Each structure stands twice: as structure tokens, then as C-alpha cells.
Amino acid sequence: MSLRVIPLTDPDRRPASFRLAWLAADGDGVPLGSAFLRVHTQPGQDHLAELDLTVHPAERRKGAGSALLEHALAAARDEARRAVTASAGADSPGQAFLAAKGARKVLTLVFARLGLDEADMTAVAEAAGHPHPGYRLTSWTGTVPGDLAQSYADSRRAMDDMPMDDTDYGTVVWDVERVREAAAAVEKRGELLHTVAAVAEDDGSIVGFTELVVAGNGEGDGQHYGTAVLPEHRGHGLGVWMKAEAIRQARGTHPRLGGLLTDTAESNGYMRAVNDRFGYRETHREVTYQFDLGAG
């Protein structure tokens, strides 16, 4: 079969990354598959690219996936990336393809859902209302208020040691500008970003946070974006406290919301225990593979 790989122009350029794209087509121009390579540019992650490669099920095993992968890895080397990651469903054809192409498995994510109609909201309310001496909770929707912006940006380092197993993920460097850009991106998609944060009473600084994104109409399922506590403030149950308050607020603010989705590294026992406590049920697993290019 005649096969062409066509570079595409992708307008999706972000402050922290840009994206390269290719289309695989047969001799008649019929699309067979596509590949998108997200190239990170911010300090801390400027060695990394993330690949999203898809081939139509009816067109697999005809060379389209291999050709797209070859172009994407060549582009990553041209951009001096040392690592390219790609994810697929556990035990899927995509996982078999990545393994066969020499990538190494570096991470397993566990996806789970809390159905809000089935949730024990009494237990959630009790956990949210449990006092934590020396701390208080605050929350906002959209962009962080100006008086909390710097403290919130500083608190983002709580994610630096999140379990990523063997992934060469690097470190996301946050400042106030990037925090605001992230919130603006959610708003641009027509979604609502809800944040609950833990504040230390002694100095008023944010020491932990949890984020939840909900569709603008308040329907469907919300998506947890991250829950983290600064290392020096761990061990006080703040993660459970914040997540309980986020669930409580989501139920009260969006009564038509169906459920809440989350994904957690298989090795992150603490966060998985928090999810289990509130009744999140595993839906599926996803594996991440990494191509080590030796550049960067």
C-alpha cells in the first residue's frame, strides 16, 4: 500500500509548549492515522515531548503507525528532546505497539469515578467540617484572587514530588503568570475551574490545594486536576480535608453534575486511599511508555 505522511500546521501554541502534527494517508489521500507531538519549552521540562498517535482500527498493521512514529521521534530529536512519552489503555493494541517499538513502560495510571448520586455526602460533609488546628480552608472559582496569587504559585511546588515512577517528567516551574494562564485556558474552553486551598493560620500562606474542572453548564462529570500538600505540612490530613470540601462544594454548586473523575499513579498509595475512602470506583487503567532519545 502506498503511504504518505503529511506534516500539518497546528495553531495550538501555548506559553509552555507547542505542538507538531502529521497525517498518514494512503495513495488516494484517505486518512489512516495521525500523530501530535507536544513539545515542552518551559525550564524544567524542556527535555520532554508527549506523543499522541492514533491509527484507525481498520488500517492497523499496514505501516501507518510505524511511519508516524518515525516522523515524530525524528522531530523530537531535531528539537533536542531526550524523552518522548506516549500513553495507551492497559492491555490495548496501543500498549502492544509501544512495547514492540522499544519504548519502556514507566507509569501506570488508575482512573476512577465518584458517582455523586451514590456518594455518602454525610461522610463527605463530616470530613470537610473536621477541624484542623492551625489551618483553614479557602476556595475560589476561576483565576486565583490577587492577594493569594503569589502564595498559590509558590504552593505549586507541592506537585514536584508526585509519584511519576520512572517517567522522565522533569519539574513544572510555576509563577503567577503561569497560574493565571492555566486558569484562562480552562475559561477559554467554556469550563469552570474550582480550587480549594489549605491556608496556614500563622502566616496566611497556602500550603495545599485541590482543583476541579466542571463543564460550564454544570452537567456531565467533573475532572479533578490535582491535589497536593507541601512536604512540610503533610501528615495532618489536609489532602482528605481539601478533597472532601471540593466534593461537598461540587455537589452543592452543581446539582446536575453526574460524577467526579480522577486519575492517580498506581504507586500513589496515599491518594488512592483518599479516593477509596470517599467511594471512587476504578473505571480503567492507562500505561505510559517512554522513548529514551539520549538528547537534551
Image (spheres, rainbow, N blue to C red):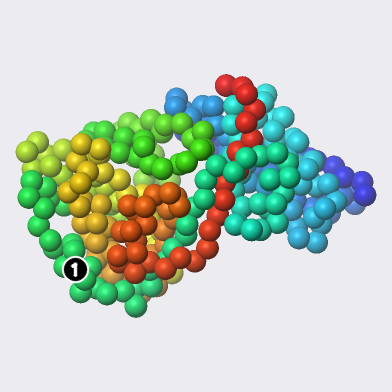
Instruction: Place residue 260 in its image quadrant.
Output: bottom left
Near-viewer residue (116 or 25): 116
Q: Is residue 199 above or below residue 131?
A: above
Question: What crowding class fits label 1: few (fewer than 14 Cα within 10 Å), some (14-19), or many (20 or more)?
Answer: some
Q: Which residue is at a point 69% across and 30% down the rendered structure image?
A: 75
Instruction: Report the residue that reaches farthest toward the bottom.
Output: 117
**Picture coordinates of residue 158, whole percent (x, y):** 30, 38
Left or right: where does residue 253 sit relative to residue 69? left
**Picture coordinates of residue 92, whole percent (x, y):** 66, 58
Instruction: Place residue 153 in its image quadrant.
Output: top left
Amino acid at dot 1: Ala
The answer, for residue 177, to whether it is visible in the render is no
Left or right: where does residue 11 sit relative to residue 111? right
Near-viewer residue (263 or 177): 263
Q: Which residue is at a point 46% across and 65% down the rendered structure image?
A: 282
Q: Which residue is at a point 92% across and 46% down the rendered structure image?
A: 2
Quarter of the image with the C terminus is top right
Residue indicated by mark 1 = 125
The answer, for residue 61, to whether it is visible in the render is yes
Left or right: where does residue 157 sit relative to residue 24? left
**Picture coordinates of residue 112, whole percent (x, y):** 44, 63
